[in-house]
Image (tube, helix red, strand yellow):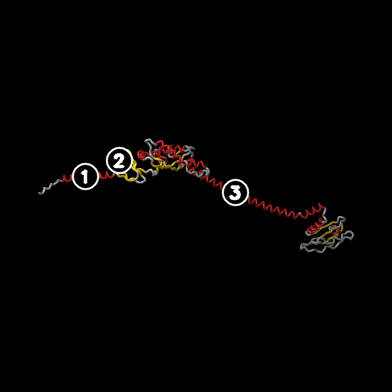
Amino acid sequence: MKRPSVTTSPWGQSYRIAFFGLYAATLLAALAWLFSSFHQVTPDSQAVVFRFGKPIAVERPGVVFAWPAPVDNVQVIPGPARILQHDVLPLQRKEQLKTLTAAQVTADAGAGAGYQLTGDAGVVQLNMQVFYRIDNPLRYVLQRPHVDALIDRLAQRASTLICAGRDLDTVLVARPETQQDDTYAAQERSRLRSDLKQMMDKDLQQLAGSDNDPGIVIERVDIASSLPDEAVDAFNSVLTASQQAEKNIAQAQNEATLRLQKSQQQADRVIQQAEASSSEMHAKAEVATQTITKLAQARASGSDAGLLQRLWRDRISAILSHAGQVLTVAPENKNRLVLSGPDDQGIDQPASSDTTASSGNSVTSNWASSSSSSVSAPATTSAPASNTPASLSDVFGDLR
């Protein structure tokens, strides 16, 4: 016996579809809620499990199971081996100018924004980067929204105190114009980063164990120091001027050394020439005075032996060879002897005729400029035999 079919109204069919749809959605939501309890933690991260808003456990990398929300909440944070970097933006000038009004920018607040005052009344701008890692995950997740602001305040405090206790030379990282042997300044510049790190670590230790403990450890502090933009041009001008002055001094020293070498060479050359000339003049003087020196030595020692007469005959021949006419007068009488010199061609001329002066007799004769040591007798005589000399020996005497 067949049961009669029950017809369903359109409203009933709508209710039926809505029921099955809601049932399927509820089943899918339950499955999604169940699978949300599994969390994947990467190898360089770690997970902190919160139960009803309280951190209860720290999970290592891998798959972490926790009750679905709102029971448990899992926050993934960097692992203890990962180094995190934070740029200290409040120390930068452009960031500080953003916090000032238009009137403050043009006032003293805008002029000194972003600069640190050094111990010698200098100004310097510091760009700091702080590298840290998470040491206490439970403390870190509680203070996570405030960690960056805390690092900024610690960096500002440390930079202010460190710069105030140092001069500009020990704050700047590189000073090319300073002396290379300035060991103290170099050591102070190298200790700048370590001093900043130590001061920030000291402040973090004071927060350790309190509710404000950020749970981080600072590993390294990097710093880049620079001068204000207005002072860079002046600093570069001074540096350029000092380098140019050193260059000019070096060139002047080189030129002075070169001139000194040339002067020394010229002085040595003049001295050598003078010594050579003096040696040559001394040798010539010795040769020129050798004869008279020997004569003086011979006369001083009394061993003349007719040396004076021989020298006289040698020298008188050379003198008479250049004379055109020689007039001699005998001391005993008034007779004169005229000896004619050689002609222009050096050839002996015949004897000239004799002439007699009113005051006495004279004899004219031709003589030769040969190398013989004797002088020839006159060719003709016009005086009487008793008063006229027969030869030159009668006039000059026996020189031999």
Question: For numbered disc 2, what is the local secondary structure?
Answer: strand
Q: Residues within 10 Å of mark 2 (few under 14, many from 20)?
A: some
3D distance between C-alphas at marks 2 and 1: 26 Å
Q: Residue furthest right?
A: 386
Q: Mark 1 packing: few (<14 Cα in 10 Å), some, or many (20+)?
A: few
Asked if one can make out residue 275 in the rendered structure from this viewpoint, the answer is: yes
Q: Gap in Å between the C-alphas at discs 1 and 3? A: 105 Å
Q: Does the CB distance between marks 2 and 1 fall below 8 Å?
A: no
- For image coordinates 81% across by 52% down, the residue present is 301
310 versus 81 height, above or below: below
The residue to which callout 2 is attached is 72
Which numbered dot is residue 257? 3
Residue ID at (53%, 43%): 181
Residue type at tag 3: Thr
First in sequence: mark 2 or mark 1? 1
Nearest the eye: 216 or 323: 216
**Do tag 2 and tag 3 residues touch (Cβ < 8 Å)?**
no
Q: Provide the residue designation for mark 1.
A: 23
CA–CA distance between discs 2 and 3?
87 Å
> For the view shown, which residue lies furthest in the left direction?
1
Mark 2 or 3, closer to the camera: 2
Give the image location of residue 283, x and y in percent.
73, 54
